[in-house]
C-alpha cells in the first residue's frame, strides 16, 4: 500500500519555480490520496499563472510515479485568485506544517490567470462525465438514474446531454420542453424530476438527422455550458456520445471535467473497452472516479440471480486497471421501460433492487468527489 508519507516525501523533492523551497514546506499540498497503483495530490497555488501550474503538475506527477507501486499519478493544481496580498493557504497538510518556516513567509508571487475563471461554469461545483469505450452499454441510462439518485441524496443536480448525434436525455427524462431565453439572453434549463436539463434534443426537430461538423459541436457544447442558466449546482453530469475518438476527446477538453465514470457491460469488460474509456480520461488528466458494470445479471421470476455473461468481469478489470469499482446494475425490464417512458426507475421505484443499485453508486461517487 502506498502511504501518505511516501507521497509527501516525493512531493518534497519539487521546488516552487524560482524558489529554493519545496512545495510541501510552502504549504501548497492540500490533499493526498492513494489507491491500488495510483497516487493523487491536490496543490493549491496562490498564483494564477497557468505556466507555473503546468510545470508543477508535470513535475509532481513525475515525482509520484517514482514511488514504488505507483503506476498512475494525478495532481490537481488549483489556481489562486492571483490578487496581490492574497492570503496563503494555511490549512495545508498536517505533515507539511512540521517542515520549514511558516508558508506565509516568502509566498510565491501571484499573477493574472487568463483562463481559470473563463473555463469554470459559474455556480457549478463539480462536473462529472459518464463515458464508455463503446456504444449501447447504458451510458445514458446510468447518467439519468445517477442524476436522479444524486437528487434523491439531496444534491442540486444538472444533466447535460453531449450526445449531439443521438440525444437520449429528452426521452429518458420525459422532457421535450423548448428552453426559454432569460432576460440576459441565456438558455433556461427545463427541470424534470428535480434535475435541470440541457440537450440538443430540445432545440432540434426529432426527425431531422443532425450532421454537425466538429467545430460546430464544440461551439454548441460550449454554449450549453456557458450560456445556460444552470444556477447553483452541486454537480453537473455530462452524458457523452459513444466511443473514445477525437470527438469525445474534444468534448472532454471543452468541458472542465472534475472526474469521469466509465460504464461497461460484463461481456465488454474484458475486451479492452474499459481500458479505452479509462485511457481517454487519463489522456486529459481527468481523474477516474470509477467503473460501473451495467447489465450485470438478471433476477429470474423465482428470485434467483442469472449471470448470462459471467460475473465479476467489471470488478476484475477495474482492479487490473487500478480504478475503483463503483457497483453493478442488473438487467431489469423496468429500467428500459422507465427510460422509454421518461420516468427513471430511481424516481418511479426508489426501493426496487435496481434503483438501490444506482443509489449505491451515487453514494460511491459522492464519497470520492467532494461536493462542498
Ligand atoms: N440495466 C438495464 N436493464 C435493462 N435495459 C437497459 C439497462 N441498461 C440500459 N438498458 C437499455 O439499453 C438500451 C441502451 O441503453 P443506453 O441508451 O443507456 O445506452 P448508451 O450507452 O447511452 O447508448 P449510446 O451509445 O447509443 O449513447 C436502452 O434501451 C436502455 O433502456
Ligand atoms: Mg447514450
Image: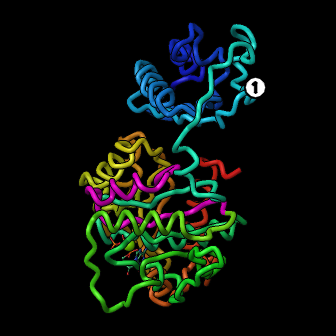
For residue 299, say whether it is visible.
yes
Circle 1: is it few (<14), some (14-19), or many (20+) Cα within 10 Å? some
Q: Is residue 344 magenta?
A: no
Q: Count the numbered circles shown.
A: 1
Residue under the point 60% across and 78% down: 188
Residue under the point 54% across and 89% down: 177
Q: Secondary structure at mark 1?
A: loop
The quadrant where ligand 2 appears is bottom left
Q: Which residues are magenta?
A: 233-260
Q: Nearer the viewer, residue 68 or 210?
A: 210
Residue 98 x/y as whole percent: 73, 12
- Position of 283 compared to 271: left or right? right
Mark 1 lies on residue: 90
Residue 333 x/y as whole percent: 44, 84
Q: Nearer the viewer, residue 37 or 261?
A: 261
For residue 296, say whether it is visible.
no
Measured along the vertical axis of the image, is residue 52 above or below residue 187? above
Measured along the vertical axis of the image, is residue 139 above or below residue 57? below
Residue under the point 62% across and 20% down: 108
Residue 277 x/y as whole percent: 34, 53
Amino acid at each position: 500500500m502506498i502511504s501518505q508519507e511516501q507521497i509527501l516525501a516525493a512531493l518534497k523533492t519539487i521546488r516552487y519555480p524560482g524558489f529554493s523551497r519545496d512545495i510541501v514546506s510552502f504549504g501548497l499540498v492540500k490533499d493526498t490520496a492513494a489507491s491500488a497503483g495510483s497516487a493523487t495530490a491536490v496543490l493549491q497555488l496562490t498564483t494564477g499563472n497557468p505556466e507555473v501550474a503546468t510545470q508543477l503538475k508535470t513535475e509532481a506527477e513525475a515525482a509520484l510515479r517514482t514511488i514504488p507501486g505507483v503506476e498512475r499519478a494525478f495532481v490537481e493544481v488549483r489556481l489562486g485568485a492571483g490578487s496581490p496580498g492574497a492570503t496563503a493557504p494555511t490549512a495545508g497538510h498536517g505533515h507539511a506544517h512540521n517542515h520549514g518556516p511558516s508558508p506565509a513567509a516568502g509566498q510565491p508571487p501571484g499573477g493574472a490567470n487568463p483562463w481559470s475563471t473563463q473555463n469554470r461554469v459559474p455556480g457549478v461545483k463539480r462536473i462529472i462525465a459518464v463515458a464508455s469505450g463503446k456504444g449501447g452499454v447504458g451510458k445514458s441510462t446510468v447518467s439519468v438514474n445517477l442524476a436522479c439518485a444524486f437528487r434523491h441524496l439531496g444534491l442540486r443536480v444538472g444533466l447535460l446531454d453531449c450526445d449531439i448525434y443521438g440525444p437520449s436525455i429528452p426521452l429518458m427524462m420525459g422532457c421535450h420542453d423548448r428552453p426559454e431565453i432569460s432576460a440576459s439572453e441565456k438558455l433556461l434549463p427545463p427541470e424534470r424530476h428535480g434535475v435541470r436539463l440541457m440537450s440538443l434534443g430540445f432545440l432540434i426537430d426529432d426527425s431531422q438527422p443532425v450532421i454537425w461538423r466538429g467545430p460546430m459541436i464544440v461551439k454548441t457544447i460550449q454554449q450549453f455550458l456557458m450560456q445556460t442558466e444552470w444556477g447553483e449546482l452541486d454537480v453537473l453530469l455530462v452524458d457523452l456520445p459513444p466511443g473514445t475518438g477525437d470527438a469525445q476527446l474534444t468534448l472532454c477538453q471543452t468541458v472542465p471535467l472534475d472526474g469521469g465514470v466509465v460504464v461497461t457491460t460484463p461481456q465488454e469488460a474484458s475486451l479492452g473497452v474499459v481500458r479505452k474509456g479509462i485511457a481517454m480520461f487519463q489522456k486529459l488528466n481527468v481523474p477516474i472516479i470509477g467503473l460501473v458494470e451495467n447489465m450485470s445479471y438478471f433476477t429470474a421470476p423465482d428470485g434467483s440471480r442469472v449471470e448470462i455473461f459471467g460475473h465479476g468481469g467489471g470488478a476484475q478489470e477495474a482492479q487490473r486497471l487500478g480504478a475503483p469499482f463503483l457497483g453493478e446494475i442488473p438487467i431489469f425490464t423496468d429500467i428500459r421501460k422507465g427510460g422509454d417512458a421518461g420516468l427513471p426507475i430511481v424516481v418511479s421505484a426508489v426501493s426496487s433492487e435496481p434503483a438501490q443499485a444506482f443509489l449505491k453508486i451515487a453514494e460511491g461517487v459522492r464519497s470520492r468527489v467532494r461536493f462542498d
